[in-house]
Image (cartoon, rainbow, N blue to C red):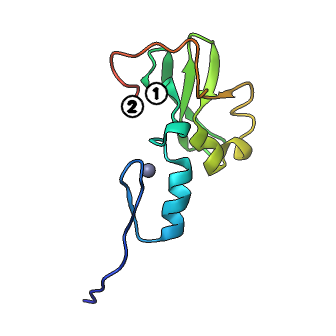
Amino acid sequence: MKSSTKAIHQCDHCGKHYLVKFACEKHEQFCPRKAENFTPCFTCKHLIKSEIIVGDGRSSRAYTCDKMGVGVYPPKAVRVGVIDKYPDQFKDHIQMPFNCTVQEPATEPAF
Ligand SMILES: [Zn+2]
């Protein structure tokens, strides 16, 4: 067994640990706990969560806002590239808004 002492990098927003500084910096840029990345959808009673099958046969989560009547996707979907990879899947969908006028708190979180 080899043992070594290394720096551990921790996200300022959620506390997640990383061994690679660049990975931590990239995470912090998109961390969902960072105030400017927060979308109120996941705390909203109008968010409907479902499972869909994407182009390559894998299942994926899908979200719909029943108040606006539109499919929505989280900012993370843009970062990981699924919007570009499956454009048909996200046709007519919008990114979850950072400020929403129809948001109402859910009694239970959506996830
Ligand atoms: Zn974080």
Q: Nearer the viewer, residue 13 or 20?
A: 13
The amino acid at mark 2 is Phe
Q: Residues within 10 Å of mark 2 (few under 14, many from 20)?
A: few
| Residue drawn at (61%, 50%) of the image | 80
Q: Nearer the viewer, residue 84 or 5?
A: 5
Report the residue marked by disc 2: 111
Residue 43 lies, in percent from the top left, at: 43, 24
The quarter of the picture where residue 18 lies is bottom left
The C terminus is located in which quarter? Answer: top left
Q: Residues within 10 Å of mark 1 (few under 14, many from 20)?
A: many
Q: Secondary structure at mark 1?
A: helix
- Given this view, does label 2 or label 1 mark the residue nearer the observer? 1
Residue 54 lies, in percent from the top left, at: 62, 39
Q: Is residue 102 above or below residue 89?
A: above
The amino acid at mark 1 is Phe
Report the residue marked by disc 1: 42
Label 2–label 1 contact, CB within 8 A: yes
